[in-house]
């Protein structure tokens, strides 16, 4: 009997039909009912009716049993869960003015995939010492960046670049990383996992470690039900990529203004104008930030030299093109209030320092972006913007308008 219950329950899994079936077997304890039950569970109508005819030669009884059995069949089929659950598509929410996100074709977002990605993102199991998770460096409270200049990975090792935030990456064309080291988000994640300065794991060796965690194993199965082996290196990276892509921010005061839900302050409006307008002597005052920190996402996704000194290799490390020297990724400025220190080398602590850099500190050399070289509010002043104290304050107020604390809870 126990063996039989085992077989029935393993066939039916944990579905409702399994429970009803077990109840049926336990209450009636009769083999003929079990035959019918199996036929019913398998949805095999021919063997179902044959069993009934064979077992119940008397017509009225056959009719009665058939009816009861048919009703049971209906009931079971209505609550029977398929043995492979298709993951539920995850709809990325974003406002129209963002335009279409760039999502990976081979990794559709699903609720289960995102849930798994989130678990993995906060799990120190993904590091060689079991102590460092992605969230150790990409801290939600700092908009998935860090307040340290150079964050600690495993064994107290420090990364050599300031941790970037992970907001709205679905609208970033890539490549990723300050110097364009990673062609895709997935590759950036792989680098974090395997770098000896960050999590220092071997992606093949980590699989058995994850296999031992039953809850993770189940989450992998739910997220990737069609893989014969759900925990794989690819699925690990895909789940983390899915979660990262859901970190979309569109609830800042700036967004609420765009969505007609809020009236900005006068200072915010002036800061907005300065940010997006290019300076033209005697014509319009501007700070020209939007020439590189373009549009609502506040980045053109390109690599540029914004006049920092000393000049480092930057993008040229990976392209080997000498003209790419000193070029770094133009970061999106969403939640910039929360992501201090600033720049790839953590050179500035405050937004006022950053604004003063663009106002009067741009280092002129053969690699400096021409956009900065020719920006001037007063003729002959470039690259000095000659912003007034009020204008600098307004710019800072606008930058703080890009803060969205809702995304920190995702
Ligand atoms: C020890 C700190 C550290 C840990 C842990 C870490 N990262 Fe990062 N992450 C960084 C740094 C530093 C960069 C910038 C790398 C570069 O510029 O080449 C970065 C870059 C990225 C990027 C590219 C962002 C962009 O805008 O280009 C993504 C995506 C990312 N990390 C995701 C993750 C995920 C997911 C994890 C966990 C698996 C993780 N990181 C763990 C420090 C860390
Ligand atoms: C020529 C293109 C360009 C212009 C114009 C420009 N930026 Fe940048 N900005 C960059 C680049 C490139 C970086 C990253 C540089 C690095 O880290 O080496 C950056 C970084 C920043 C950062 C640091 C963000 C972080 O997460 O670390 C802030 C803040 C910033 N810019 C604000 C501004 C403001 C305000 C203006 C206008 C006054 C402006 N930018 C104009 C290209 C530009």
Image (cartoon, grey):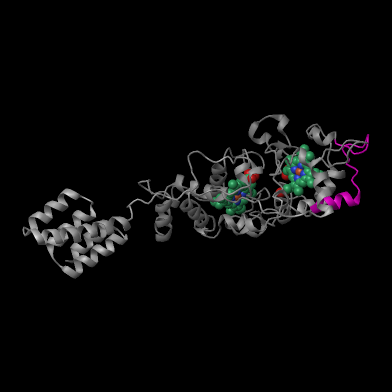
Residue interval drawn in magenta: 375-397
| Residue 6 shown in magenta | no
Residue 96 percent across, percent down from the top left: 63, 44
The answer to whether 84 appears left or right of 141 in the picture is left
Q: Residue at x 63, y 55 (%)?
A: 407
70 or 286: nearer the eye? 70
The answer to whether 397 appears left or right of 333 in the picture is right
In the picture, residue 383 is in which quadrant?
top right
Q: Residue at x 28, y 64 (%)?
A: 19
The answer to whether 287 appears left or right of 144 in the picture is right
Magenta span main SS: loop
Q: Is residue 367 above or below residue 4?
A: above
- Spot the residue most to the front: 60
Q: Residue at x 52, y 55 (%)?
A: 118
Q: Quadrant of the C terminus?
A: bottom right
Residue 107 percent across, percent down from the top left: 48, 43
195 or 246: nearer the eye? 246
For the question of whether residue 16 can be seen, the reply is: yes
């Amino acid at each position: 009997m126990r063996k039989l219950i085992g077989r029935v329950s393993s066939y039916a899994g944990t579905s409702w039909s399994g429970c009803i079936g077990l109840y049926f077997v336990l209450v009636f304890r009769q083999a003929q009912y079990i035959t019918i039950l199996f036929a019913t569970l398998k949805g095999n109508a021919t063997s179902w009716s044959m069993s009934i005819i064979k077992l119940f030669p008397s017509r009225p009884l056959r009719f009665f049993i058939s009816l009861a059995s048919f009703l049971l069949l209906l009931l079971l089929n209505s609550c029977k869960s398929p043995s492979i659950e298709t993951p539920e598509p995850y709809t990325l929410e974003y406002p129209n003015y963002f335009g279409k996100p760039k999502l990976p074709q081979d990794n559709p977002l699903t609720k289960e995939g995102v849930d798994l990605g989130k678990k993995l993102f906060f799990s120190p199991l993904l590091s060689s010492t079991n102590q460092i998770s992605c969230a150790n460096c990409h801290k939600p409270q700092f908009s998935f960046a860090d307040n340290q200049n150079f964050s600690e990975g495993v064994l107290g090792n420090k990364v050599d670049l300031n941790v970037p935030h992970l907001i709205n990456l679905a609208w970033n064309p890539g490549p990723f990383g300050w110097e364009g080291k990673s062609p895709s988000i997935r590759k950036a994640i792989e680098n974090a996992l395997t770098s000896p300065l960050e999590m220092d794991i071997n992606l093949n060796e980590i699989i058995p470690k994850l296999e031992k965690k039953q809850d993770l194993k189940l989450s992998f199965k739910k997220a990737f039900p069609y893989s014969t082996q759900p925990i794989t290196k690819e699925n690990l990276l895909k789940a983390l990529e899915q979660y990262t892509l859901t970190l979309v921010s569109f609830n800042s005061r700036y967004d609420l203004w765009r969505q007609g839900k809020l009236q900005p302050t006068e200072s915010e409006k002036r800061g907005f104008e300065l940010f997006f307008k290019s300076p033209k002597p005697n014509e319009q005052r501007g700070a020209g930030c939007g020439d590189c920190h373009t549009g609502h996402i506040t980045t053109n996704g390109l690599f540029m030299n914004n006049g920092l000194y000393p000049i480092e290799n930057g993008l040229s490390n990976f392209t080997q093109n000498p003209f790419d020297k000193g070029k770094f990724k133009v970061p999106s400025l969403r939640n910039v209030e929360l992501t201090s220190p600033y720049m790839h080398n953590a050179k500035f602590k405050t937004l006022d320092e950053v604004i003063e850099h663009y106002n009067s500190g741009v280092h002129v050399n053969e690699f400096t972006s021409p956009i900065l070289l020719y920006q001037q509010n007063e003729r002959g002043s470039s690259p000095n913007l000659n912003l007034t104290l009020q204008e600098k304050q307004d710019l800072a107020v606008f930058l703080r308008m890009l803060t969205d604390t809702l995304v920190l809870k995702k």
